[in-house]
Structures are given as structure tokens and as C-alpha cells.
Image (cartoon, rainbow, N blue to C red):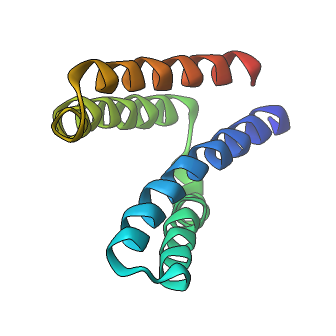
Amino acid sequence: DPQLGFSIAFAIAIHNIPEGIAVAVPLYAGTGDKKRSFLAALRSGLAEPLGALLGFVVFRAWINDVLLGVIFAAIAGIMVFISFDELLPSAEKQGEHHIAIAGLMTGMAIMAISLIVI
């Protein structure tokens, strides 16, 4: 379905913006090297679509709706676990508890809105 494909590509593109920032900013803060920070963020951003393309080519014969549903559910669970187990405690250490929770809620709201818009 081309509409679904476009929606997923758009969601990945939106997701890669904060991911690129999350890679580039700490690297730039640590090294002061803009070029190195940009290239690291670029490599990180390209890994997902290139990996998806490679996975599609290799596993095309076995891809079906049930398998995709299982894979997406597993990945969503992994991402939620990492967010609550690693990222939230780290954010609380860097700042105040209520700011970390506000950031979490804002991120969830943005994701929910993006799902509605798409």
C-alpha cells in the first residue's frame, strides 16, 4: 500500500531528526568538532533506512502482515522498556524529576499527534 509506505517513511524521517540531534549534540559538546558530529549523526540517521532496505531485500519472501505485527510489537516494547529503564532515570539525574516527567509526557503527546496526523 503506497499510502502506508509514505506514512511510515514520513514517521521515520520525523524520528530521525531528534535522533540526529541526540547523537550530534553530546559529541559536539565533547569534541568541539562540528564535522565529526555531523557525520556521526548522518551515519546514525542512514543506518535505519539502509537496514530496512537490506532486510526487505533479504527477507522479502517471508514478510507478511502477521510477522510485521509481531516485529513492530516487539520493537515498540523494547523502545518503551529502554525509555523507562535507561533514559528516564538518566534525565532525572541531569535535572529535576518534574522536568523529566514533563519531557516524557510531551514526547508521548507529540508521538500521539503524529500518529493522528499521518
Residue 57: quarter of image: bottom right
What is the total number of numbered labels drawn onto the structure image? Answer: 0
Would residue 55 be visible to someone looking at this image?
A: no
User: In the rendering, at what x and y percent does residue 68 appear?
Assistant: 51, 36
Camera-side residue: 79 or 21?
Answer: 21
User: In the rendering, at what x and y percent does residue 79 appear?
Assistant: 34, 36
Q: Residue at x 17, y 34 (%)?
A: 89
Image quadrant in which the N terminus is located: top right
Is 13 situated above or below 11? below
Q: Residue at x 83, y 33 (%)?
A: 3
Camera-side residue: 21 or 99?
Answer: 99
Camera-side residue: 74 or 48?
Answer: 48
Outermost residue on the right side: it is 2
Residue 82 is left or right of residue 64, and the answer is left
Image quadrant in which the C terminus is located: top right
User: In the rendering, at what x and y percent does residue 54 appear?
Assistant: 56, 67
Residue 99: quarter of image: top left
Q: Residue at x 65, y 43 (%)?
A: 14
User: In the rendering, at what x and y percent does residue 38 appear?
Assistant: 56, 75
Would residue 91 be visible to someone looking at this image?
A: yes
Is 93 situated above or below 77? below
